[in-house]
């Protein structure tokens, strides 16, 4: 399978993933390459992917392949990996974006949900990257955006598994970037703060109120800011991207504060369960 440019996006059915698809398609149009670009869109919701594919084909004239897959299912992933390993292009962009969270104490978490989080947030990201690297090494230019989180820099009570999974994404991305330093492959880990996507609804446990999500309104970053900053960062070969000034500041503080101070701050975090509305 060969096309001039190939863009693979996991978690393309909503939120950042969907916005990434439009952002990259727009950029391709500006460079008069939209019609030579193929998108491979991955998520579970086939209907949403098809609607997005129709829109991208209609608006930009791109080629779009819809690839429904439950990334938490190792058998489904195996078929996908085989497909992705066969992709070849001169210009390749992989956006490992699919992910989910789980708000609440670890002691009351569901083991199956924890397993799915590990599979989607970490295992699928590693396997897809590994499957596509040989073709990326043959390509003229290649780019990998790994969507982590501001949570990667901090151990967060009531978000323990999620924060740990995103710390993995950042660590993996940093090491891979160094390994590939002498190649033409750029690797960027993106660390957004909270944004209005489907993420909060998925992360909230059944029966819990929206108020239980511990972020203030001012702390949110727009989806557009996240995808614009991430896309620009990977093109410029930046190792990390903290979208928006406020998130950059918080990230800077967290990465430089002593561990005892962070432990102290996190232990004051309001954790009392608020009953469902
Ligand atoms: N929004 C935030 O506040 C925030 C902040 C920092 C980082 N992030 C990260 O940003 C990334 C994108 O999340 P989002 O905010 O855009 O949330 P979202 O709107 O819920 O999107 C999540 C995407 O992941 C896909 N996904 C989830 N489970 C999957 C599975 N088992 N198999 C295949 N695809 C799956 C979903 O598609 P289907 O449901 O159709 O499968 C969806 O397309 C995630 O990695 C998240 O951790 C989000």
Image (cartoon, rainbow, N blue to C red):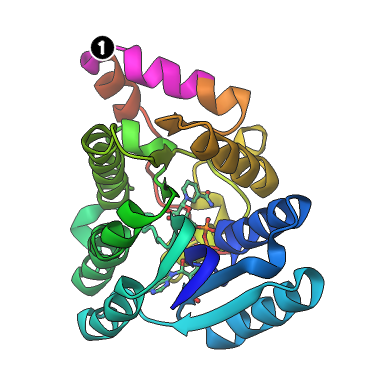
> Percent from the top left, x then y, of residue 116?
27, 70
Q: On the picture, is 70 further left or further right than 32?
A: left
Residue positioned 30% across, 72% down in the render: 85
Dominant SS in magenta = helix
Query: Residue 151, can we see it?
Result: yes
From this view, report whether residue 134 is shown above or below residue 78.
above
Helix, strand or loop at label 1? It is loop
Which of these two is toward me, 174 or 262? Answer: 174
Quadrant for the C terminus, please.
Answer: bottom right
Which picture quadrant has residue 84? bottom left
> Percent from the top left, x then y, of residue 136?
35, 56
Query: Residue 129, can we see it?
Result: no
> Percent from the top left, x then y, of residue 195?
59, 47
Mark 1 CB within 8 Å of ligand 1: no
Stretch of the chain drawn in magenta: 249-260
Q: Is residue 116 magenta?
A: no
Q: On the picture, is 130 further left or further right than 186?
A: left
The tally of labels here is 1
Residue positioned 44% across, 50% down in the render: 140
- Name the residue carrying label 1: 258
Which of these two is toward me, 252 or 4? Answer: 4
Residue positioned 45% across, 81% down in the render: 44
Quadrant for the N terminus, please.
Answer: bottom left
Which picture quadrant has residue 217? top right
> Percent from the top left, x then y, of residue 249?
52, 18
How many residues crowd mark 1 within 10 Å: few (<14), some (14–19), many (20+)? few
Which of these two is toward me, 160 or 108? Answer: 160
Residue positioned 61% across, 46% down in the render: 227
């Amino acid at each position: 399978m060969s096309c001039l440019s190939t863009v693979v996006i996991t978690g393309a059915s909503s939120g950042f993933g969907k916005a990434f698809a439009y952002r990259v398609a727009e950029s391709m149009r500006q460079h008069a390459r939209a019609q030579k670009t193929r998108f491979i869109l991955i998520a579970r919701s086939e209907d949403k992917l098809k609607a997005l594919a129709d829109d991208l084909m209609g608006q930009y004239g791109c080629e779009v392949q819809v690839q429904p897959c439950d990334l938490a299912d190792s058998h489904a992933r195996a078929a996908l990996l085989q497909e992705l390993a066969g992709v070849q292009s001169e210009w390749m962009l992989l956006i490992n974006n699919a992910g989910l969270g789980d708000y609440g104490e670890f002691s009351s978490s569901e083991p199956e949900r924890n397993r799915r989080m590990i599979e989607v947030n970490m295992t699928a990201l590693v396997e897809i990257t590994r499957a596509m690297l040989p073709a990326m090494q043959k390509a003229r230019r290649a780019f990998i955006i790994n969507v982590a989180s501001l949570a990667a820099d901090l151990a967060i009570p009531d978000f323990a598994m999620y924060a740990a999974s995103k710390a993995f994404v950042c660590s993996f991305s940093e090491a891979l970037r160094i390994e590939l330093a002498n190649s033409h492959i750029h690797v960027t880990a993106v660390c957004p703060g909270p944004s209005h996507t489907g993420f909060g609804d998925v992360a909230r446990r059944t029966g819990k109120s929206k108020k239980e999500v511990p972020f203030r309104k001012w702390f949110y970053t727009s989806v557009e800011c996240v995808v614009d900053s991430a896309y620009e960062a990977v093109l410029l070969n930046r190792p990390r991207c903290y979208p928006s000034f406020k998130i950059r500041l918080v990230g800077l503080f967290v990465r430089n504060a002593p561990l005892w101070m962070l432990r102290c701050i996190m232990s004051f975090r309001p954790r009392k369960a608020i009953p469902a509305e």
